[in-house]
Image (tube, rainbow, N blue to C red):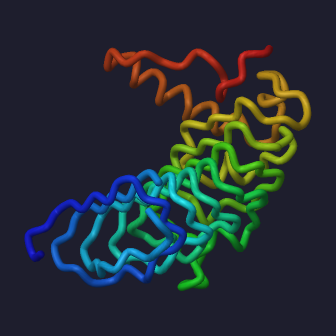
Amino acid sequence: MVKLTQLKLAANKLESLPSLTALVKLKSVREVASAQSGALSVLLTYMLQLDVSDNALTEVPELPPGLQSLVAHGNRITKFPSHVLSDKLAELDLSHNSITALSDSDIRSSASESKVEAVAGLTSLNLDGNGLSALPTAWTALAQIKVLSLRHNSLHPQHLPQSLFEDTALESLRLEGNSQGTWTQTALQALPGFAAFEARRLRRAQKALHGGVEVDRTLCGITAK
């Protein structure tokens, strides 16, 4: 299996995975859809991408240290998997799980005491559809994040801390479909630190326009003024 670059296990109902740590040269693993309960018995060393979406997982196991992308949407995960965070992981999709709260300690890697060093690689995080009702107050741990999606949760505008806007590289934020409070563009623009994020968002939009890419005309998905 030295030359294997992709493994797809379709139509499964995986409830657990073992620690994935040692199969040479494997670049991508995709586990999708709904098998009988059981564990994936492969070991991975140089894997870059892992997709375990639409299964019945309640937690994420230890993963290869060089993993760059983890897609785990549509499972039954209840706690944010801090242990997967590293300077290598760039994309993390945990949408449509059951993670109802996110704390400052959750976004730190358990392997390091340094918040910035622990998760400096993460640039994209999707937490749509989790029922989230709490967010970290300090976001320096995710200083490199550029894309954050928090749609269809139970958040209030006041749950968005100043640190999220000022202590990160955030350029794209999606917030539509949250059920608490009044979500308007005016309410967002009045939040402390929002102006710093807005400046980055507009620069990104201008670059996209110059490149011929269609630009989202809403403000973080919010259309009400």
Quarter-of-image position of residue 64? bottom left
**Of 27 and 206, the residue lying toward us:** 27
Quarter-of-image position of residue 77? bottom right
The answer to whether residue 117 shows anywhere in this view is no
Quarter-of-image position of residue 188? top right
Q: Residue at x 61, y 37 (%)?
A: 173
Q: Residue at x 37, y 18 (%)?
A: 213
Q: Residue at x 30, y 81 (%)?
A: 43
The answer to whether residue 60 shows anywhere in this view is yes
Locate the N terminus by quadrant.
Answer: bottom left
Locate the C terminus by quadrant.
Answer: top right
Please tell me whether residue 150 is drawn above or below residue 40 in the rendered image: above
Find residue 167 and report its horizontal and vertical position in percent.
64, 54
Find residue 84 and report its horizontal and vertical position in percent.
50, 72
Identity of the residue furthest to the left in this view: 3
With 66 as the anchor, is 133 left or right in this view? right
Find residue 96 and report its horizontal and vertical position in percent.
63, 48
With 121 as the anchor, is 66 left or right in this view? left
Please tell me whether residue 58 is drawn above or below residue 114 in the rendered image: above
With 103 as the anchor, is 145 left or right in this view? left
Identity of the residue furthest to the right in this view: 181
Please tell me whether residue 88 is drawn above or below residue 163 in the rendered image: below
**Of 138 and 42, the residue lying toward us:** 42
Q: Residue at x 83, y 31 (%)?
A: 190
Find residue 89 and report its horizontal and vertical position in percent.
42, 64
**Of 115 and 80, the residue lying toward us:** 80
With 88 as the anchor, is 13 left or right in this view? right
Identity of the residue furthest to the front in this view: 36
